[in-house]
Amino acid sequence: MLATVVILSEVLVPEDNLMTTKSVAIHEAQQHLAELIAQVAAGVEIILLDGQVPCARLVPITPHAVQRVPGLHAGSITMSPDFDQSLPDEFWIGIA
């Protein structure tokens, strides 16, 4: 039995490549997982349906364009000295 695949839409993604979005029933996806993963690796977005309800999305992993640098903004964020103090009861019961 072949999977029934319906093209939902085409959306514009970064770098001006068109990404095709397809929907597939969960039980069909289980039978054709390797084929779906190959499609995702090629840039196709797969929406998994439970009946007619979308429940998950398979998308290609994109590499991070810029490596994060620890400590790059050291000292630019401060925390008040009472940050970890308990909040007053008025805060929790809504009294201004």
Image: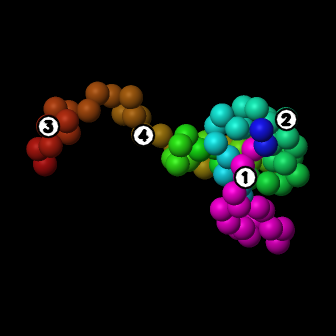
The answer to whether mark 2 and mark 1 are in CB contact below 8 A is: no
Q: Residue furthest front?
A: 1
Q: Which amino acid lies under the numbered mark 4 shown in the image of this protein?
A: Ser
**Location of residue 39 with respect to 12 vertically, above or below:** above
Q: Nearer the viewer, residue 90 or 4?
A: 4
Left/right placement of residue 63 relative to residue 74 reads right
Residue indicated by mark 3: 93
- In 3D space, how far apart are the residues under numbered discs 2 and 4 (Cα atoms)? 52 Å
Q: Residue at x 71, y 61 (%)?
A: 7
Q: Residue at point 67% right, 51% down?
A: 23
Along the polypeptide, which appears first: circle 2 or circle 4?
2
| Residue wearing tag 2 | 34
Q: Earlier in the sequence, mark 4 or mark 3?
A: 4
- The picture places residue 55, in percent across and down from the top left corner, at 56, 42
The amino acid beneath tag 2 is Ala
Which numbered disc flags the more N-terminal residue, 3 or 2? Answer: 2
Magenta extent: 3-20
Circle on res. 5: 1
* The quadrant where residue 43 appears: bottom right
Q: Secondary structure at mark 4?
A: loop
Q: Residues within 10 Å of mark 2 (few under 14, many from 20)?
A: few
Q: Secondary structure at mark 3?
A: helix
